[in-house]
Amino acid sequence: MKIKIHSTETEPLNFFKWFFNSETIAKYYDWFFDDKNTQYEPRLNPSQKSNRLDGYIEYLCPNNNFELVKVTIEESLDKYLSVQSSSTIKLITNNVNELIKDSKEYQNQLEFYIKELNDLEDSQKELIQQYPFLVKPIIDIQNYINRRYLKGSIREYNIIENKNEKLIYEIFSYLGGVNDNGNKVLNNNDYDYLIQSLKSFIATGEVPIFKKKFSKLNGVCNLTLRRTFYMFWKKLGEDEKYPRDKIVKFLKLAFEQVEITSEKTLYDGLTKKPLKWKKFIPKIVKELP
């Protein structure tokens, strides 16, 4: 499909701001399924068979001896968006290379790109829930900036059907990344064990038996940790299956840094937050209750 608004060196995210809306994506679907009734932009390789219901087309591929090739809408969109995210990454690199490394302008420009991507994702939550693969290029660009320039937290790309499992990754994935100093918050094995323990809690409603406690988290204070579990409880909708006292029990049994704090103190102070948030803490943890 032809791109109406291209990314540029001064505006490297222009394409995604244009593409991320339901009307544009609907036009892409019409173009992909070669629907002559709803669009007038011809495909380079017209489809021999179009199946909207099952989400695929078949066409004769000139690069493959004109054999009949089957392609799904997800495969097509993934390729289309991957090309654009690669282009955006090159534009960002060119732009940043013109600035003095580690200068205030350099840092501000990179943080501005991260913020713009976060704002785009937040503004299109419903669209991304409908088309989960749309979040991939956002994560790819953010990870590139954080890995190469800012030493920020690295996000994982997971398409998860269960909404409570999605919530686990949305809230706790930062514990598997790096802090503001570029140090790992939790080592990979501990992070994986934490995620599995949270999934077990979601599945059974019971606090799991921990083989060991997680040692002190790098760059995460007690108030941030409490607040993380508080937002987890709130986002679960205060479900009777996951009462607040079980959330507190999970927190106390799992983490060394709160083991000397009584369950009553944790329960009463679960809503407290630090005076100043660190940059690597995700927005969902910092939301108001």
Image (cartoon, grey):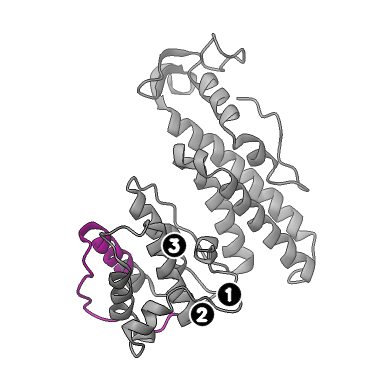
- Depth check, front residue: 58 or 24: 24
For disc 2, the marked residue is: 219
Query: Measured from the top left, where is residue 32 in percent x and y?
Result: 51, 22
Quadrant in the rendering for residue 114: bottom right
Question: Residues at badges 3 and 2 in contact (C-beta under 8 Å)?
Answer: no
**What stretch of residues is rendered in magenta?**
193-218
Question: Residues at badges 2 and 1 in contact (C-beta under 8 Å)?
Answer: yes
Q: Taking 140 as reference, is 258 left or right?
A: left
Query: Measured from the top left, where is residue 209 in percent x and y?
Result: 19, 74
Say which residue appears at 44% left-offset and 75% top-offset.
225
Instruction: Please say if 212 is above or below 82.
Output: below
Q: Amino acid at mark 3?
A: Ile
Circle 2 — which element? loop
Quadrant in the rendering for residue 19: top right
Instruction: Please say if 88 is above or below 245.
Output: above
Circle 1 — which element? loop
Labels 3, 2: front one: 3
Q: Dot 3 surroundings within 10 Å: few (below 14), some, or many (20 or more)?
A: some
Q: Dot 2 surroundings within 10 Å: few (below 14), some, or many (20 or more)?
A: many
Say which residue appears at 38% left-offset and 53% top-offset.
166
Total numbered labels placed on residues in the image: 3
Q: Amino acid at mark 1?
A: Asp
- Depth check, front residue: 174 or 178: 174
For disc 3, the marked residue is: 171
For disc 1, the marked residue is: 180
Query: Measured from the top left, where is residue 129 in percent x and y?
Result: 45, 42
